[in-house]
Amino acid sequence: MVLLGFLSLLTSCNDYETYGDKKEKERKAIRQFLADSSFVVISESQFHQQGDVTNVDKREFVYLDNNGVYMQIVHRGCGKPLQDGETSDLLVRFLERCLLDSSAVYNDVNPYDVDVMNVRRQGNTYTASFVSGMWVSTYNSEQVPAGLLTPLSYLCMGRPRSADDHIAKVRLIVPHTQGHAVASSYVYPYYYEISFQRKTDI
């Protein structure tokens, strides 16, 4: 009986995942997703040399050194960027998919399902909260993860006025350190497709 108990203890110890184990699993999931999707990772310096854009035809994602987020700018958007000192309500549509368990949350199918995000820019810092929508009902939280704010400094937040205008759209791979409470708790990376536009035109 003692031997069986000891073996059971050894087995449970071997099943225990350290934080380091979980981070390595996260890194592997991100690498696998990039490879399976044939995405090409470019450096931040190359991104800046290209005028802070990614080549969608070449399937480029830029890796951002300061926070570990991977970003592809699909459309930079129309209109103007958020100005220093400005607060604005943005209409946000998104697809969120966990790279480890494939669970998904989205509001980008029905045109009437849209989240509202209140954003303030102060210098180069953006703070935001969700006012309403799928995010709040799913996560019972208004907090916007830092990773989702990453693209805002590169985008324009207008509303289309012609057939040639596009609203801002990005794709992101967000590590757990830049994600929501679930991502942080389980050390899960998430993939996002997100569009932004102002709720009211200016």
Image (spheres, rainbow, N blue to C red):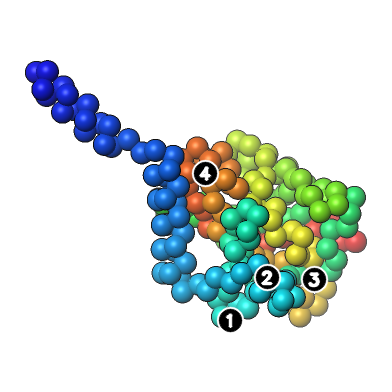
Contact check, label 4 and label 3, Cβ < 8 Å? no
Disc 4 from disc 1: Cα separation: 30 Å
Residue at point 22%, 26% (across, down): 9
Residue at disc 4, secondary structure:
helix
Q: Considering the numbered disc 2 on the image, is that residue within a helix, a strand or a loop?
A: helix
What is the three-letter code of the residue carrying label 4?
A: Ala
Q: Which mark is residue 65?
A: none
Q: According to the image, label 3 marks what residue?
A: 78
Q: Nearer the viewer, residue 169 or 39?
A: 39
Q: CA distance from mark 2 to mark 3?
A: 25 Å
Q: Quadrant of residue 14?
A: top left
Q: Amino acid at mark 3?
A: Cys
Q: Are marks 4 and 2 in contact (CB under 8 Å)?
A: no
In the rendered image, the quadrant that contains the C terminus is bottom right
Q: Which residue is mark 4?
A: 183
Circle 4 crowding by C-alpha within 10 Å: few under 14, some 14–19, many from 20: some
